[in-house]
Amino acid sequence: MPEYNQERKTIILKPFNELRVEVDFGKKYFVKLKTGFAELFGAELGKQNEYEFSGNKFAIFSYEGCELEISHCSSEYTASTTPMNSYMNLHLALQNRRNLAKKNNQIGPRLLVLGSSDSGKSTLCRILANYAIRSFEAPIVINLDPANGMVTVPGTISATKFSHTINPIDGFMSHGVVNSSGLIDQPLVFYYGYNSVSEYPALFKSVVNNLAKILFKQLELNPKEKESGFIIDTFGNINPSDYHIVDNIISSLQVDTILVVGNEKLYNDFTKKYQDNSLISIASVQKSGGVVNCDLRFLKNIQNDIIKKYFHGCDSEKLQSFSTALRISETGLFKIGQDSLAPSSTLPLGETRKVSETQISQVTIDERVQHMIIGVSQLDLPEATKSEKNAAIKQEPDLNELPLLEYNVQEESVLASPILGFLNV
């Protein structure tokens, strides 16, 4: 039986209840709103519109109650205990501050969301962004989790203005889709090149500082975005040894509100840390009972799906990637950071390490660069290296569904798929 015609059933969702669903990759799940009002990650569902999901974990919430037609799924259930009231109260508080910012011609709230992995941070950021958009704001969503990617390939951090509702199915990747109003939101993206921020903290802090510097310059020219403020999503597994990275984020992005999701220790640590700073307020919300732990296999599938959408587009807007030939002799490939460093204890007495984790080193182009994502720099190089195109490189998950590099040493050429500054090698 075709999946589209699989057996359906009706669910009556009571007010302030939600339907929680887990769909594996390779499976399809259909939802149609028959009557009432419902939302997915803060975005309203259209009546009689059928939504198709695959490889996703989500919850459909209703403030007033609704009737849903759904296909059967191996993991779905309704829940009456949700954090949505807390999220709405948080949105209203942020909206009051946006209104105050408009009145006084100031920058809007800068919200930093902290929490453990699988705490629902990204979901909360998406809900708050959609609520702000539905209130006719244009919030800037900043992704500081390089393993996520959010609006582009993993290994990056980004800041994106959202002026139209985030697509319920495509999510943040719908940022480049032109809607009926003709609006398009292009992200500001910086390439970090690694999944973990603790792998090269000095490099990560430098990239965050550069993003913040350009972002604040842009805000001076865009009062609407300035008044709407920031919603900042962060990396998970924050250990005390990573607090200096968070401190740098707070300082560079002028954070004035810290929200901790489902982590009492993190909340207490940062409350003590900033208790004497009257410019920063700290709050906490409980982790939703619908949040599920994602295993490494699922996370890898998500990364592959994000990369595929970046090059080939989303369900709502397809893209056509293409291949081009680059002569190896005219191409310089570089990476930032060293694969391995000798322990400081092995250095001669009185000597300090001279190799920096932000040091650039050249990479030999051979078959080892297959299945990697390359970020293309637009910088002008010194005269001695003008023939070299400066790029940072990062190993990514298997890209089985994407075009692969064809490497030929004799012909000195590589074939790649470039789209907006990244190559799939």
Image (cartoon, rainbow, N blue to C red):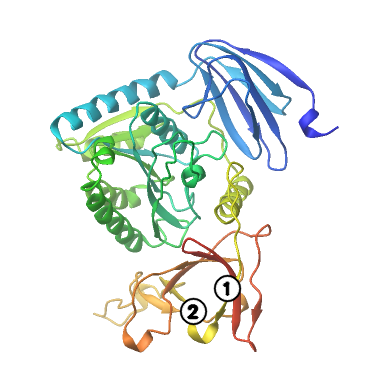
| x and y percentages locating residue 334 in the rendered image | 44, 76
Q: Position of residue 153 (x, y in %)?
A: 50, 55
- Which quadrant would residue 52 be assigned to in this image? top right
In this rendering, would 119 be left or right of 296?
A: left
Q: Are marks 2 and 1 in contact (CB under 8 Å)?
A: yes
Above or below, 174 relative to 201: above
Q: Is residue 408 above or below residue 136?
A: below
Give the quadrant of the N terminus: top right
Residue 7 lies left or right of residue 161; in this view the side is right
- In the image, what residue occupies the spot 36% across and 30% down? 132
Q: In this view, which residue lies farthest toward the right? A: 1
- Number of other residues with Cα within 10 Å of mark 2, as a class: few under 14, some 14 to 19, many 20 or more: some
Estimate how packed mark 1 is, as few (under 14), some (14 to 19) or many (20 or more) residues with alpha carbons within 10 Å.
some
Residue 276 locus on image (x, y percent):
14, 37
Which residue corresponds to the image point at 36% horizontal and 32% vertical from the top-left?
264
Callout count: 2
Q: Amino acid at mark 2?
A: Val
On residue 363, which mark appears?
2
Label 2: element kind: loop
The numbered disc on residue 394 is: none
Percent position of residue 157, x then y: 40, 53
Disc 1 secondary structure class: helix
Q: Point out the tag, 2 or 1, that comes first from the N-terminus.
A: 2
Q: Residue at x 31, y 83 (%)?
A: 382
Disc number at residue 369? 1
**Amino acid under disc 1:** Val
